[in-house]
Amino acid sequence: MFEHYRTKGIFIKKEDRGESDQLFTIYTGGFGKLKVLGKGIRKITSKLRSGAEIFFLSEIEFIQGKNYRTLTDAIVLEKFSDMRDNLKRLAIACRISEVLDNLVRGQEVDQEIWQLLNESFEKLNNLKIDPTLSRIPPSGKNLLNPAESEGKLKIVYYYFFWNLFSILGYQPELFNCVVCQKKLLPKNLYFNPKEGGVLCEKCFAKIKKGLEVEPEVIKILRLILERDWQILARLKVTNSEEKSLNLISSVK
Ligand SMILES: [Zn+2]
């Protein structure tokens, strides 16, 4: 007989298969990344539907067949409703899931990644935007400056991205020049992912590859890798800093 396995997992991807099946990619605490087939799950009578939905944290049970795994039970533990009901938050959850799916290829248990994913989704779900950061006077209902609140939410993505990179063994060097090893001064800094971090002005003049970044951006990256959420949550990120962060925080 096939064995049953139970674990907690977050649904990071779903694809329709055949007439009524769905293939889920689930990042789990007990097995790492798994692909599990939900048989007949698109039928309204399916008992699995209530617990198997994109971005749910659920307790799942599956059986390991010869060629694929089949979902046999899914009990939702956390729906991350505030994240799933808000398009901007949802878009960031999609980006986090995509990066995770792209960078973590095989099935390998990793408690650090599992915790980082849970932590990032919780932040994305619960992050309140501090109204005192807004330029709009706190008189009306809409206290938030839309651009600022979006920038805040994106910090969660950068938080996930760089800490995932770091767990996978690619923590960037942010304190000394990656080439000459000299301590970096807060001016004329260049980010070069191939070299594995930040270049000083002199080394950049020789290598000529890298993206000029404001010293503030390097400070934000340091806070992200120190996981100093207290400060990060209160940080005001300017548009140009956000642009730089976006450019350097992409897999492509
Ligand atoms: Zn240098």
Image (cartoon, grey):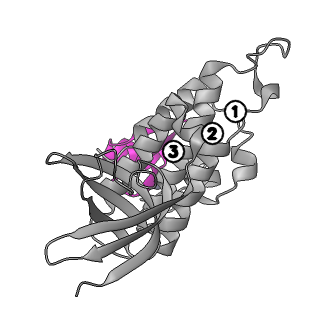
Q: Indicate which disc residue 157 carries.
A: 3
- Amino acid marked by disc 1: Lys
- Considering depth in this image, is 115 or 48 the residue closer to the camera? 48
Mark nearer the viewer, 3 or 2: 3
Snapshot quadrant of residue 61: bottom left
- Which residue extends farthest front? 45
- The answer as to whether callout 1 falls within 8 Å of ligand 1 is no
> Residue 211 has which mark?
none
**Circle 1 SS class:** loop
Q: Which residues are magenta?
A: 189-216
Q: Nearer the viewer, mark 3 or mark 1?
A: 3
**Tag 3–tag 1 contact (CB < 8 Å):** no
Identity of the residue furthest to the right in this view: 139
Pick whichever, 102 or 158, lies toward us: 102
Is residue 6 depicted above or below 87 in this figure?
A: below
Amino acid at pointer 2? Glu
Q: Looking at the image, is 62 positioned above or below residue 210? A: below
- Drawn side of residue 197 relative to residue 140, left or right: left
Among the two numbered marks 1 and 2 on one chain, the one whose residue lies closer to the N terminus: 2
- Judged left or right of residue 88, residue 47 is left
